[in-house]
Amino acid sequence: MSSRRGSKSKKLGSSNSKAVNSPSSSTTSSSKHFPETSIDCQSSPASSSARSKPQCFYSENLYVDADRSKENVTVTVRFRPLSPREIRLGEEIAWYADGETIVRNEHNPSIAYAYDRVFGPTTTTRHVYDVAAQHVVSGAMEGINGTIFAYGVTSSGKTHTMHGDQRSPGIIPLAVKDAFSIIQETPNREFLLRVSYLEIYNEVVNDLLNPAGQNLRIREDAQVLASHLLNLSLDGSQGTFVEGVKEEVVLSPAHALSLIAAGEVESSSCGGNSEGEAVNLSQLNLIDLAGSESSKAETTGVRRKEGSYINKSLLTLGTVISKLTDGRATHIPYRDSKLTRLLQSSLSGHGRVSLICTVTPSSSNTEETHNTLKFAHRAKHIEIQAAQNKIIDEKSLIKKYQNEIRSLKEELEQLKRGIVSIPQLKDIGEDDIVLLKQKVKRETNHLLTLTIPLFLSLKLEDGQVKLQSRLEQEEEAKAALLSRIQRLTKLILVSTKASQSSRFPQRPGLRRRHSFGEEELAYLPHRRRDLILDEENVELYVSLEENAGEDTVKEEKKTRKHGLLNWLKLRKRDTGTGTLTSASDMSSGIKSNSTPSTPQAGSSNFHAESRLSQSIVTGSSPPMDLLSDARHDREAPEDNFLGQETPLTSLKTIDQIDLLREQQKILSGEVALHSSALKRLSEEAMRNPQNEQQIQVEMKKFSDEIRGKNEQIALLEKQIAESILVSPNRMEKSEITLSVAELVAQLNEKSFELEVIDFLCILFHVLLRAIYVPK
Ligand SMILES: Nc1ncnc2c1ncn2[C@@H]1O[C@H](COP(=O)(O)OP(=O)(O)OP(=O)(O)O)[C@@H](O)[C@H]1O
C-alpha cells in the first residue's frame, strides 16, 4: 500500500475509531458519534458503479478505495438469514445490509458502519470467497503471507463460512481447491504443499495431526528477535513458528482437505540460473475462531477458565488490531496471546488479512452484533503493507538443495577432469564392456562422457586406491542424497501444462475453476496422468505411443527435461536395468522410446499403476486387483540386461512401500475428516433437534464411510507388512551379487544424478497451515 493511501486511511481511521473505541460505546453512544463520521455512501443496491468499485465518502471527503485496500486488510461483514427457529419465535430484523458496503440499524438508521463489502443473507459462500478470500490465497501462492479468519458470535455463521458443507463448501475447501488450481495454472513453477493443523485451547497449542504433539511451544525466528531488539523492520523473516508441529505433505485437494489446511509457500525462479536468488516463503492461515460473545454467563469452574482464555485470544486480537490502527502505538502486544503471536507476521505488515465478520440480523442479538460491527470497523484501519518475504539464508529447503546441487555439479566436474586420463580396463571382463557399451549407447552424449570415467574409476590400480576409496565414500554419500531427492521429488506438484505448451498454446481467459473431485489426478506428482484424463491429451498420449522414437518424442523429452521429474524417471527406464517404480514414474503417461523389457507386462503395469494412483487421489479404495497387480509387478523378476537383481530393485520395493504408506496416510486423514464432520453433525443435532432425523441419516453415511476406510487402512497395513517382508531378502541377495551389477547401478545413479540436478534447479514449495480455535 502506498504511503499516500496509507495516510488517507489513517486519517479515516482516527476519525472513526473515535466513534467506536469508546469502551462504553453502546448503540446510543455510537449513534451520538455517528454524525462525526457522517457516512455518505455512494453505493446502493441499484448502483452499478458502486457494485463494481465500492466507495464511500465521509464528511472529511476522504476517499475509500475498497479495491486497493485488498492489498492489506479486507474487512467484510456477512449476514446469515434468520433461522427457522428465530422466525418461529417472531424475532425481527435488527441489522441489515444497506447496499454493498453499509450495515445499518433497523431501529435507528443513523447508526451505520461502512466496510469493504457487506454480504446480505442470500449471498453464497462462493461469492464471499471471490471477494474476500481469493486474493489472499493467490497472494500466498506468490509468497505473500495470508490470513483469513471468521469472527462473530456463536451461531452467527463462522463455521458455515469457513468449513461449509457439501452443498455449500466453505472458505477452507475453496481455498485448498484454489491453491491446487493455481498450481495447475502455473506451468513454470513447482510447488510442495504441506499442511499443519493446530488448535489453541486454553492458551495451549496442540497439534491436531499428531496426538503426541501437545502443548507445543511457539518460537520466534532468530532474525525477527534481532529485528525487534534493534527496532528494525524486517521483511525477510517468517516470524513465529510452532516448534515440532507436524507438517504433512499433501498431493491433492482431497488429501489436503482431509487434513484441514492452510499454506506457506516456498518458491524459487525457474531454470538453472537461480544461484544467489532469494526464495519466497509464505503461509496461509485459515482460522475458525471461537465465538466472540462474552463468556460472562459462565461464572464457575472449567468453562469460566476456558471462556477467559478464549476471550484472551480475541481480546488481544482486538487490542492488537486497534493498536495497529493507531499508527502512533509503540508497543503492540502480540505476545499476550498465542493466537496473535502466531499471526504476528501476517498482522504486522508482511501479509494480507481478510477478516470476515459473521452476524445475525436477529433482534435477539442486537448488542452482540453491534460489538462485532465495531470490532470489524476498527480492524478496517490496520495499515499493512503486503510484502513478499524474501528468504535469503540457508533456511529454505530449496536454497539448500540448490547449494547441494551446485556442489554436486562441481564434484562431478572434478571427477570428470581427474579420472578421464587414467582409464584402466584390464580388470573389466569383455562381456562387461560389451554390455556397458550397449548401455551407454542409450545415453545421450553428455552422459557418456561423464559416466564412463566414473565406471572405470572403480577399477583403478594401487596408486589410485586412495582416490578410489574417497570416490566410493562420495558415491555412498551421493547415493544417500539421491535417495532423499527421489523421495522428495515424489512429493513435488507441478502444473501439467509445462510440457504441453509447445503443442497446445494456453487458452487465454480466466483461470478455470474446479469443482470438487474434478481433475484432481492432474495435481499429483504422477504428473502425466492428465494425459489420460484430458481429451486433447489422450491424443498426445496415443500419438506418443504410436510414434515412439520419432522427433516429436525427442522434442517432448527435451521440454520435459527442464522441470519434469517424470522425464528423469523415463530415462531411468531407458537404461534397461529394470523399472524404478516410484510414485512419480507411476504417473508416466508417456512411454519411453525404448521398449520395456517385457512389453506386455510393462503395459499392464502402467495401466494398473495409473488406476492405483487414481484411487489414491480420489480417495477411493484401491481395487484389490490393482494392489495385487502392483504387488505382482514388485515380485516379478526384473528383466534387466544382466538378468539379475540390482540395488534398484530394492529401491523399487522401498518406493512401493512408500506409496502404500502415502495411501494409508491419505485414508487416515480422510477418516479424521469424516470423524470431525460426524462430531459437528452430532453437535448440530443437539442444537437443532427438529432436524435430528435428517442429521442422523447424514451421520450414518459418514459412519459407514469411516468403517469402509478403516477396512481399507487395515488392508493397506497388511500390504505394507507383506512388502516389508519381501524387501530385506532382496537386499541381502543383491548385496551378495553386486560386482558388475553394482557398477552399472552406479552408472545409472550418476546419469540420474545429472538429470536430477537439472530438475532441482526449479524446485518450488508450498506449505499450508491451519489454526483452529476450539469453540
Ligand atoms: N449464510 C448462511 N446461510 C444459511 N445458513 C447459515 C448461514 N450462516 C449460518 N447458517 C446456519 O446457521 C447455523 C449456525 O451457523 P454456524 O454453526 O456456522 O455458526 P458459528 O458461528 O460457527 O457457531 P459456533 O460459534 O457455535 O460454532 C447453522 O445451522 C448454519 O447452517
Image: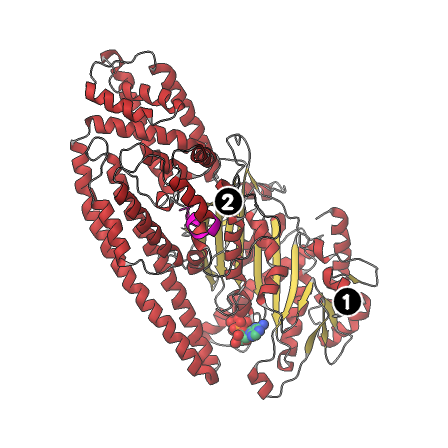
Assess whether residue 583 is covered by the magenta stretch. no
What colour-coding does the image apply?
secondary structure
**Of the residues under marks 2 and 1, which one precedes in the sequence?**
1
Range covered by the magenta-colored residues: 524-536
Using the rendered view, name the quadrant where residue 674 is placed: bottom left
- Res. 81 image quadrant: bottom right
**Which residue is painted at 45% across and 53% down in the image?**
195
Which one is nearer the viewer's eye here, 362 or 365? 362
Q: Residue furthest front?
A: 546
* Point 70% across, 74% down: residue: 26
Q: Quadrant of residue 59?
A: bottom right
Residue that carries the numbered disc 1 in the rendered image: 47
Q: Residue at x 38, y 33 (%)?
A: 549
At a point 21% along the width and 30% down the height, the residue shown is 642
Question: Which structural element holds mark 2?
Answer: loop
Q: Where does label 2 land, which residue?
A: 497
| Residue 644 image offset from top left, x and y in percent | 19, 34
Q: In front: mark 2 or mark 1? A: 2
Q: Is residue 125 above or below residue 215?
A: below
